Image (cartoon, helix red, strand yellow):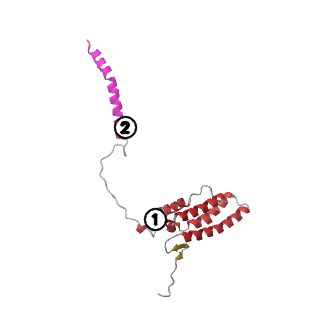
């Protein structure tokens, strides 16, 4: 046991994890790596690459690198880390490397999380599917409502109300006609 070296962080599958579960080191490493990708984008832009193609290259290189395994580490980011990532994205927008409609990094993390959850939920063979709670089915015996499902009873009720209003407005006329017809 004396030969085991104690470390303060470890890099697993490209994600740097510190002993305090802080992502500051990973975010710094990630931003440095993405900054070097910006040089390649600047070179492509200088050689006349169209804007839409430049945006595609940005999404497939820089944005993919920013979002790599984000489902695993984004929850451990501090507000400062999120702010650093947002500032980097804003810089890319100002340099026209990416679309102006590119979302904030927190929104991109949420989309990635929702995508993973939908995949796990819809695929019963997914490695994480067994971690979901079992489906709970509850049967409720409620009285039937006229406004749900079948609109016929509502239409019948409306028709009856309309007929009653017509009859109520015609009843003095009907009485008068009956009196006139009863005369000899």
Q: Residues within 10 Å of mark 1 (few under 14, many from 20)?
A: some
**Residue 120 marker:** 1
- What x and y, as percent, mark residue 1? 47, 87
- What x and y, as percent, mark residue 175? 29, 20
Q: Is residue 38 left or right of residue 25?
A: right
Residue depicted at x 52% and y 73%? 17
SS of the residue at dot 2? helix
Q: Nearer the viewer, residue 37 or 114?
A: 37
First-in-chain label (1 vs 2)? 1
Residue highlighted by disc 2: 155
Q: Is residue 136 left or right of residue 101?
A: left
- In the picture as drawn, the residue positioned furthest to the bottom comes out as 2
Q: Which residues are magenta?
A: 156-184
Residue depicted at x 36% and y 39%? 154
Q: Quadrant of residue 68?
A: bottom right
Count of labels shown? Answer: 2
Q: Is residue 181 left or right of residue 11?
A: left
Q: Quadrant of residue 39?
A: bottom right
- In the picture as drawn, the residue positioned furthest to the right comes out as 47
Q: Nearer the viewer, residue 112 or 150?
A: 112
Q: Nearer the viewer, mark 1 or mark 2?
A: 1
């Amino acid at each position: 046991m004396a030969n085991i070296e104690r470390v303060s962080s470890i890099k697993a599958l490209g994600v740097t994890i510190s002993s305090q579960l802080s992502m500051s080191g990973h975010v710094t490493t990630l931003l440095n790596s993405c900054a070097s990708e910006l040089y390649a984008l600047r070179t492509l832009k200088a050689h006349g690459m169209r804007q839409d193609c430049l945006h595609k290259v940005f999404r497939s290189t820089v944005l993919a690198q920013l979002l790599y395994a984000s489902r695993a580490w984004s929850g451990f980011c501090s507000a400062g880390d999120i702010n650093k990532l947002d500032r980097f994205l804003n810089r890319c927008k100002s340099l026209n490397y990416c679309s102006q409609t590119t979302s904030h990094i927190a929104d991109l993390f949420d989309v990635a999380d929702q995508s993973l959850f939908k995949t796990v939920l819809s695929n019963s063979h997914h490695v994480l599917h067994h971690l979901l709670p079992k489906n709970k089915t509850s049967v409720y015996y409620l009285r039937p409502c006229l406004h749900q499902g079948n609109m016929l009873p509502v239409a019948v009720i409306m028709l009856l109300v309309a007929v009653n209003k017509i009859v109520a407005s015609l009843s003095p006329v009907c009485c008068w006609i009956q009196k006139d017809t009863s005369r000899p």
